[in-house]
Amino acid sequence: MTEGYLLNARSIAQLKKDHQLLHSRFATLRNGTVSAPSTSSRREESVLVKVTELITGRVSGQLGQGKATVFDVDSEGAITDAERDDYEIYNDSLVPIPVDSYIRVSRNFRSGLWLPVIGLQTAIGKTSGGISARSGNTAGSGAVDIFYVASDGTLTDSGEQVSAYNIAGSAITASVFITIKRVEGSGFWVIDMEDCG
């Protein structure tokens, strides 16, 4: 048997909607009344949004979610509110996305859900316990609580924790703010900087 894509109810509903749109356009072509398709009928695959409700981080097997407003980008690079309903954005990262952030999101083909397009990822963390130093070629490691900066500048605990690797030759004590970076294409977090104040 040939393997194919599994479609859920939302995907099937979107296929039906797209089919009806194509059927309508074909009928218009047949009648000789061709006009340019309206922008409202095109299915968008990638848009710029401004976060209006904290997009929570992923917890275990459940994506985080929050709301964002769609923005249009003109040929000069100016951005304006598209004045549409807010989109529900789903987050596959452990790191929450704070309110007032501008991010690009794309539609997942199978589910139809909007997901952030995120490359190299940096997060703010606070060591829960100490983090051991590197020993030779073996990185040290320890638990890090993920924080984010709220719109008022408050460092806020997301409630999520990750294990991070320390490639420095010195250990990091408990309850210290640090930044960590996720190694692209993997789930590994590496300590980037610690608060030495």
Image (cartoon, grey):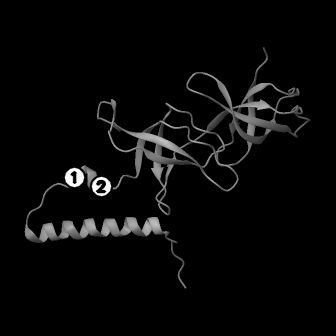
Residue farthest to the right, as pictured: 135
**In the image, 6: left or right of 82?**
right
Q: Quadrant of residue 17?
A: bottom left
Q: Position of residue 55 (x, y in %)?
A: 56, 41
Does residue 136 lie above or below 175 as drawn? below
**Mark 1–mark 2 distance (CA, rounded to whole Å):** 7 Å
**In the image, 156: left or right of 194?**
left
Residue farthest to the top, as pictured: 197
**In the image, 45: left or right of 169?**
left
Check disc 1 and report its element: helix, strand or loop: loop
Kind of residue at badge 2: Arg
Kind of residue at badge 1: Ser
| Marks 1 and 2 in Cβ contact (< 8 Å) | yes
Q: Nearer the viewer, residue 14 or 182?
A: 14
Does residue 140 lie above or below 12 as drawn? above
Q: Nearer the viewer, residue 128 or 106?
A: 128
Position of the C terminus by quadrant: top right
Q: Position of residue 138 (x, y in %)?
A: 88, 40
Q: Quadrant of residue 150?
A: top right
Residue lying at 64% horizontally and 54% vertically, measured from the top left: 62
Say which residue label 2 marks.
42
Residue lying at 86% horizontally and 28% vertically, measured from the top left: 174
Say which residue label 1 marks.
38
CA neighbours of label 1 inside 10 A, class few (<14), some (14 to 19), many (20+): few
**In the image, 88: left or right of 129?**
left
Position of the N terminus by quadrant: bottom right
Check disc 2 and report its element: helix, strand or loop: loop
Residue lying at 30% horizontally and 30% vertically, measured from the top left: 76
